[in-house]
Image (cartoon, grey):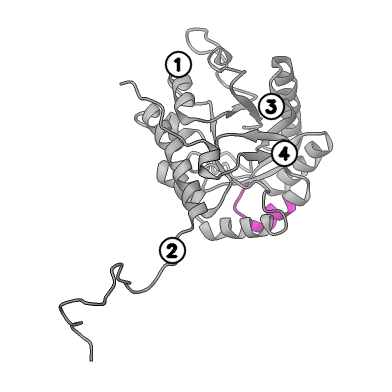
Amino acid sequence: MSLAPPVSLPAEQTGDESLVIGTHTLRSRLIVGTGKYETFPQMQQALDLSGADCLTVAVRRERLYDGQGQNILDFIDLARYTLLPNTAGCYNADDAVRVARMGREILRSLENAGADWVKLECLGDPKTLLPDPIETLQATERLVADGFQVLVYTSDDPVLARKLKAAGATAVMPAGSPIGSGQGVLNANNIRIILEYLKADDPTYPVIIDAGVGTASDVAFAMELGVDGVLLNTAIAHARDPLGMARAMRAACDAGRWAFQAGRIPRRLYAQASSPEEGVISLRPYSS
């Protein structure tokens, strides 16, 4: 079934601003990955339907070529997308720095604008895929000193988030929940604290939810919290209908952003009538 791209209102009609990350400006607040699709043509269609203009690519891909000998780069329009190389699979700072430099050289050879930034992943163990906080901080400091704009995958720990920003991270990317778990945002309070800390004197500093998204409502909820964007992969690639889910993610990202800007009403313990109470026929049943 062919799916028409969803309608997204341009920024000038919504009053919204583009997402600025360091020297990069993105139209979409959704950043998507390129792994785990059944075929490269399916990936290509999903990327298109997602509306993203930034794609993250693992530098050490397990499958640069598929079973038919097709190269993933043949299915990515490098004039349309900015690539964000990531250090997926690294478990210490030395490996992460080495892979980041490899990614920079690859993207420079492709003349892609993403050559100057990196999504840093420095994992703690293969079971949880949670980040190693010490190695992540050390890698951030080294990559910043090496001239990278560093987008850091981290836990939802507010204290570590502050240290990463202080170390020069261009963006902090707390996990909603473990990578690929599909559990959504488990600790909304910590995300709120991170937003408060990192944006207190720097309102435009980018905070992006990375990992754990399972479906479109997770994206909408994250955006309603006030994060600047969401990065995801598996939730689209492993959906029963990846193209339909890509379309849903795009709409959810827009909806969540618009809801955050509009402002939700306060939560109340008791009901509050939405119609005026003057002139009603019946009396209140329990009034004295």
* Residue at the top extreme of this rendering: 69
Q: Is residue 67 visible?
A: yes
Residue type at mark 2?
Ile
Vertical comparison of 229 with 33: above or below: below
- The answer to whether residue 226 is magenta is no
Q: Earlier in the sequence, mark 2 or mark 1?
A: 1
Q: Would you name the residue on which mark 2 appears?
A: 265
Q: Would you name the residue on which mark 4 appears?
A: 22
Question: What residue do we see at 23% from left, 92% from top?
Answer: 288
The crowding category of the residue bearing disc 3, from other C-alpha atoms within 10 Å (few below 14, some 14 to 19, many at least 20), is many
Helix, strand or loop at mark 3:
helix
- Between 86 and 285, which is closer to the camera in this rendering? 285
- Between 74 and 155, which is closer to the camera in this rendering? 74
* Residue at the bottom extreme of this rendering: 288
Q: Nearer the viewer, mark 1 or mark 4?
A: 4
Q: Are marks 2 and 1 in contact (CB under 8 Å)?
A: no
Q: Which mark is residue 41?
A: 1
Residue type at mark 1?
Pro
Q: Earlier in the sequence, mark 1 or mark 4?
A: 4
Q: Which mark is residue 114?
A: 3
Across and down, in percent, residue 153 comes to 63, 42
Q: Is residue 279 left or right of residue 238?
A: left
Q: Are marks 1 and 4 in contact (CB under 8 Å)?
A: no
Question: What residue do we see at 55% from left, 13% from top?
Answer: 65
Q: Nearer the viewer, mark 2 or mark 1?
A: 2
Between the residue at mark 3 and the residue at mark 4, the CA separation in whole angstroms equals 11 Å
Across and down, in percent, residue 234 comes to 47, 33
Residues shaded magenta: 154-163
Helix, strand or loop at mark 4:
loop
